[in-house]
Image: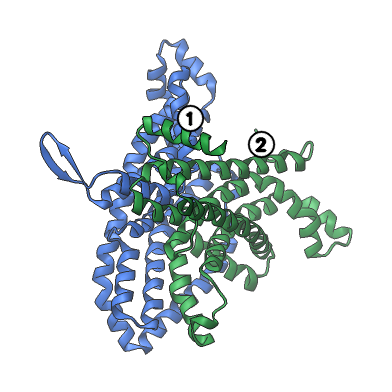
Chain colours: A green, B blue
Amino acid sequence: MIDAALQRFIAGAATLGLHYDFLLSGGEVRSWLAGMAMTLLLVVLAIPLSLLAGTAFAAALTSGRPWLAGPVRAYVELTRNTPTLVQLMFAFFALNMLLSRALGGAAHNPFSPVFWVVAVTGLHVAAFHAEALRGGIEAVPAPLVEAAQATGFSGLEILRYVTLPLALRTALPALVNNLVNLVKLTTIGSAIAVNEVTYASIMIWTQRDNVLELMIVILLFFGLINLTVSRIGRAVERRLAVPGYGVGYGV
Amino acid sequence: MSAAALPARGPLRAAWPWLAAACGAGLLGLLLDARLTRDLLDWLPYLASGFVMNVVISVLAMTLGTLGGVVLGAMELSAARLVRAPAVAYVQVFRNAPHLVLIFATTYIFPFEIVVAGNYLPFPDWLKAVLGLAIPAAAYVAEIARGAILSVPTTQWDAAKGIGLSRGQTLRWIILPQCLRRALPPWMNLAASITMSTALASLVGVHELLHAATDASTAVRRDDFTVAIYLTVLLAFFLFCYPISRLTRRLERRLATR
């Protein structure tokens, strides 16, 4: 049943001049699906990391303590103004190498290329999250914060229960935008031989010379992931909407 | 860009001592290690020739992307669905596409030479990378242009119609001059972002900064040199993109207070 449908698809695509016959070769299909699974894994790991780190960075930036805000601000500026690929190369070829030396050989180094891709892309996007959240935190009306202080909330409690929940609502569209970028950024993993979908596709098209065919599927694949991310973002936005607190929407 | 995205001046100032300390420590390390300094200086012209390529790719990609994007943005606002639909589809597809995938696509799909009137013209990889980055740039510019055009009150369109201007004339003489000011900050953000994406061209073998650094690192094969050379690459991009980003923020702040 599935085989027949596949045959019909391949024949149909061939009339358009597209050659999808690699879909009949089990090994190539398996490695391609493994690539897609790896991309999904990178996305699923990097998104929570970026959100957690972004929140922590935003808290540091708005803490009012220069020794905390200063280094984080320097990190945010550095990471926003340098290419993620160069950061990954630096992390993998310089930091990872130094780490291997320190631990006595690459065999003792527990950090895999996958770890570095997740860490670099996640922390890169965290800097963008931090900026969006910081803007939201600073946009919270001062009387609200003062009221919380008067009620006896500590600084951290104000962040947790007052400013961050409101900032999250203001920043959500920007956060979703950053997450879409994060999904696209995971492709740089192919530079250090992480077998994600781009890397797996390169392996196939160097054998088969069917770049266009694979490219169409890759673009659809990323389109689908990003559609899902934006859909979830919009659903969260609707769920969290506070009646009457429409900051930035249609104002 | 909402006002909420603007960083306050205070925190930025707080970052300076730390950035300065990091640079100072790096310089001190260099001074203490004469061999590393000499090797870095030896490779500096090679790195610089690479960075020129980054700038060339980014300027050409932004030029092509801006030309294409403005047309697409205007198409997105057309009253005719036949004109609107392809532009909307283009923007949707290529805004969601990873830049690296597009660079791979243009590199492998286009031939290495093209025939123009019987002459074989070479089609080098760096030019393909330009196209690979111009494709998403056009999609982003289309959105910037559309947003800028929509930000002008529709009553101005009506008023222009009232004095007998056509849709095209209204766009050219009334709306566009106002749009340009509004579109400038996001356009500059995009220019910085595309410049940073030019590093991706190293993965398809274009001789640019990151590629040059990898060459140097494999040639010298010393740990301290590898660390230093990648730091140099980071610094070069930072020195290029940070002023753009500061200028953008200043423009945003000025427009936001209006």
Foreground residue among B45 and B168 = B45
Mark 1–mark 2 Cα distance, whole angstroms, equals 23 Å
Q: Which dot marks residue B161?
A: none
Above or below residue B233? Residue B78 is above
Is residue A128 at all visible to an observer of this figure? Answer: no
Q: Left of B64 or right of it: where is A140?
A: right
Q: Percent position (x, y) of residue B158?
A: 50, 15
Please tell me whether mark 1 sits on a helix, a strand or a loop: helix
Side of A173 relative to B199 (left or right) = right
Say what amino acid the circle numbered 2 marks: Tyr
Q: Position of residue A87 (x, y in %)?
A: 46, 66
Q: Nearer the viewer, residue A63 or B50?
A: B50
Dot 1 amino acid type = Val
Q: Are marks 1 and 2 in contact (CB under 8 Å)?
A: no
Indicate left or right for A151 with B110 as reference: right
Residue with the most extreme left position? B118
Q: Is residue B62 above or below residue B240?
A: above
Q: How dense is the environment of label 2, judged by Cα within 10 Å: few (below 14), some, or many (20 and up)?
A: few
Q: Residue at x 51, y 56 (%)?
A: A186
Residue, x 39% and y 62% (percent of image)? B237
- The outermost residue toward the right is A151
The quarter in which the N terminus of chain B is drawn is top right
The subunit letter for the residue under badge 1 reads B
Label 1: how many Cα within 10 Å (few below 14, some 14–19, many 20+)? some
Q: Where does label 2 land, which residue?
A: A249
Give percent across and percent down for residue A188: 46, 58
Secondary structure of residue under mark 2:
loop
User: What is the x, y in percent for residue A203?
Assistant: 40, 56
Residue found at x 32% / y 88%: B34
Closer-to-camera residue (B18/B55): B55
The mark found on residue B88 in the picture is 1
Q: Chain of mark 2?
A: A
